[in-house]
Amino acid sequence: NLSEKLDKALHVLKGHGQITEINVAETLKEIRRALLDADVNFKIAKEFTNKVKEKALGQNVLTSLQPGQLMVKIVKDELTQLMGGDAEGIDLSGNPSVILMSGLQGSGKTTFSGKLANYLQSKKAKKPLLVACDVYRPAAIDQLHVVGEQIGVEVYSDRENNDPVKIAKAGVAHAKANGCNVVIIDTAGRLAVDEQMMTEIANIHKAIAPQETLFVVDSMTGQDAVNTAKAFNDVLNFDGVILTKLDGDTRGGAAISIKSVVDKPIKFIGTGEKMEAIDVFYPSRMADRILGMGDVVSLVERAQEQFDEEQARKIQKKIAKNRFGFDDFLSQIQQIKKMGNMKDLMGMIPGAGKALKGLDIDDDAFKHIEAIIHSMTPDERSTPSKLNASRKKRIATGSGRTIQEVNQLLKQFEQMSKMMKMMQGGGGKKMMQMMQN
Ligand code: GDP
Ligand code: MG
């Protein structure tokens, strides 16, 4: 599914703190492929990756301290924007507020009507009325009555009448007479878009002038969902979209495409058959779901908050002058530690949880490194090349660690300084140029 594919696409970036020109291009390509596979329209997918690339360049991803995570954050933010930015509520200002349901047969209109009534009654202290305008199947009226009974909401129906426009009007009048401040009108659908259905829903819409016209769509129908949304929007100019059946393993592609094609907010999602399975649609949460990123984003945010920029600048200067020493290394470790417990941090990285099972990563690793550095003289810290065998032995004894551990730390330190010098030099600039191509 899309989550797994994007997860894979972002894998390279997530694991390493490093981005190269190769994995940027590769990642963008993978992201685009994943979106296409999830039934996201080609044009939208292309625009999306272009925007991500632009942002990555604008924010100097390649020279940032945590390029991989910054990239993940850019992808997530862009995806959130694409799906609508902030969550949008529904208009409940009318008295009564009239809400009209539209959509194909089986999309989940009747179920969602019940869910919404239940939500407004229990969460918004409203007194809703459900109106049964699906006159073609007697079972449809029964279904709404069952739902109403389940949630304790009155249902208005008229089995003698087969004109949905008249029933809708009578329903609104009934609500007014009985002090109901929300009217939810459940309508009939067809298996596919047809002339008669469109005319009927358009007539109801005209007759009752609802505050909210909602288009209900089964998110499992992929690219078809987009076409249906467009057809309904052309006739109704609806106010919002309801994505149903987003439980289980459903692809999230529909959410991305629909918003882009009809430019209407997704307002609620249905996540199961039960009356409680309704959620306000939050674009950022949906982006998380689609990306399957777990808590990576909050990890990134925490890292960005904690990193002392002043410190970073100082260290960069020292690297440039070839004077990066163990004191700087120590302060970097302290920065990392400020971000929180090592296990917690690792746990936020998707996939890391499994890999860490059985492995005992704890803050002791850092304690040992700190102990070793603390046993060095200031001179040794700023000029590590002075560390000969006898000094190493003294440090090991002083810190209570082994010679092997001291050597290992020196090796790590050396690799790290080498890498930093590379990033400082022409490398960064070259990477940026490659990325632009
Ligand atoms: P309508 O024809 O548009 O009124 O659709 P219904 O409300 O009758 O729903 C059609 C089928 O989809 C029913 O079996 C519902 O139980 C099911 N359904 C509706 N919403 C959801 C949902 O969010 N998740 C799941 N799993 N099933 C749903
Ligand atoms: Mg129905």
Image (cartoon, rainbow, N blue to C red):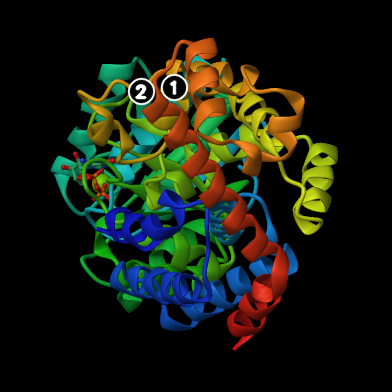
Quarter of the image where one finds residue 334: top right
| Ligand 1 rendered quadrant | top left
In the image as oriented, which residue stretches furthest toward the front? 390
Q: Is mark 2 within 8 Å of ligand 1?
A: no
Left/right of residue 113 with respect to residue 96 in the rendered view: left
Residue 422 coordinates in the image, percent (x, y): 63, 65
- Amino acid identity at mark 1: Ala
Residue that label 2 marks: 361
Residue 295 coordinates in the image, percent (x, y): 46, 35
Observer able to see residue 364: yes
On residue 365, which mark appears? 1
Q: Are marks 1 and 2 in contact (CB under 8 Å)?
A: yes
Give above or below for 174 relative to 191.
above
Give above or below for 1 relative to 398.
below
Q: Residue at x 40, y 38 (%)?
A: 349
Give above or below for 159 relative to 423.
above
Mark 2 lies on a secondary structure that is loop
Q: Residue at x 71, y 23 (%)?
A: 377
Instruction: Between residue 166 and residue 303, name the one nearer to us.
Output: 303
- Amino acid identity at mark 2: Ile
Q: Residues within 10 Å of mark 2 (few under 14, many from 20)?
A: few
> How far apart are labels 1 and 2 at the CA level?
8 Å
Q: Residues within 10 Å of mark 1 (few under 14, many from 20)?
A: few
Residue 155 coordinates in the image, percent (x, y): 35, 27
Residue 187 coordinates in the image, percent (x, y): 35, 50
Mark 1 lies on a secondary structure that is helix
Left/right of residue 189 with respect to residue 378 in the rendered view: left
Instruction: Between residue 28 and residue 126, name the one nearer to us.
Output: 28
